[in-house]
Image (cartoon, rainbow, N blue to C red):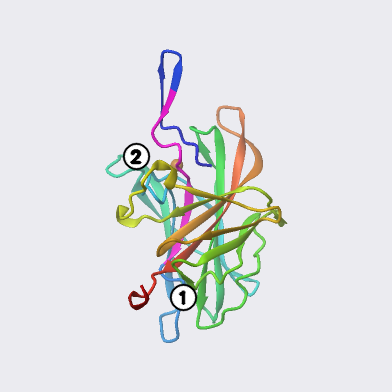
Amino acid sequence: MNKVVKSAILTGSVLFLSASLANAHFLLLKPSTDNIEQGRSPRISLVAKFTHPMEGGPNMDFKIIKSGAVVDGQKFPLHWRSKLIPAMRRSKHKVHMYETTFTIRRPGVYQFYVDPSLYYEPAEEKFIKQITKVYVEAYGMEEGWDKPIGLKAEIVPLIKPFAIWEGNTFRGRVYFNGKPAANIDVEVEYLNVGHRVKPPADAFITQVVKTDENGYFEYTIPWAGWWGFSAIGYGGKHRYKDGKEYPIELDAVLWVKAYPKPRRVR
Ligand SMILES: [Cu+2]
């Protein structure tokens, strides 16, 4: 969820909550490309990072518990290398991110997923777990993107997810434990590489759309780049090291790339 209170100042009897209240966590899972054309190398690289994409940080620590590449019901393992990066720019506190390469075996639609460890968020007094997915289409075989792969929390797109122009409307359906998730929040963030986009107000850092009674949501992608959707769910409780039990926010995350509108049609 996005209610991170960076500081609370008590003045007299009035409690001011300052700074960013709109601040969503996102597990980023990004391939080097989402389309592999004929004649191109079958090798792609992927990165996994637990971050705040619109703001470019801070980065949070996590482990990858399960992961894989699923194509036509077949699953291939991913072998991640971990890397330490600063939690904030110039910060001494280091957290893990992960990198891997994968060689496409045959044409098809590859659904890459990462199932991370629980992350305890002190500001929200809860755990967060984001099961995250991204699609890569290889060598012209375009079938299978509309099928769930059986994750505990999953977004299934209703638009071909590896051929999206900026300005297209992304539609998806959210499933938790295989059932459509009605009337929940889906947080949306842009991967703001190099801070090129400056939100006009903090409310724009994380946009929010709701699912309908059948678990469908939509969002019109305003400009090109990588966009993350995080459907916010509940995954029970877990005991923290302080001995107390806290709720688990279980989210289904999906990343898609929007391609820029060609210059000649602008
Ligand atoms: Cu965070």
Q: Quadrant of residue 266?
A: bottom left
Which mark is drawn over residue 35?
1
| Structural distance between the alpha carbons of marks 2 and 1 | 36 Å
Q: How many other residues sit within 10 Å of disc 1, few (<14), some (14-19) or many (≥20)?
A: some
Residue range (magenta)? 16-31
Could you say where residue 138 lies in the image, as x and y percent from the top left?
50, 78
Q: Quadrant of residue 126?
A: top right
Q: Is residue 221 above or below residue 41?
A: above
> At 44% from the left edge and 67% from the top edge, which residue is drawn?
166
Check the image and name the residue furthest to the top: 12
Could you say where residue 56 lies in the image, as x and y percent from the top left?
36, 49
> At 36% from the left edge and 55% from the top edge, which residue is drawn?
192
Look at the numbered disc 1 and give the secondary structure of its residue. strand
Disc 2 marks a residue whose amino acid type is: His
Does the beta carbon of the residue at mark 1 sit less than 8 Å from ligand 1? no
Which mark is drawn over residue 93?
2
Could you say where residue 27 lies in the image, as x and y percent from the top left?
48, 52
Q: In this view, does 161 lie above or below 98?
A: below
Disc 1 marks a residue whose amino acid type is: Asn
Could you say where residue 24 lies in the image, as x and y percent from the top left?
47, 45
> Is 18 in front, or is 82?
18
Viewer-side label of 2, 1: 1
Count of marks placed on residues = 2
In the image, is residue 22 part of the stretch drawn in magenta? yes
Q: In which quarter of the image is residue 31?
A: bottom left
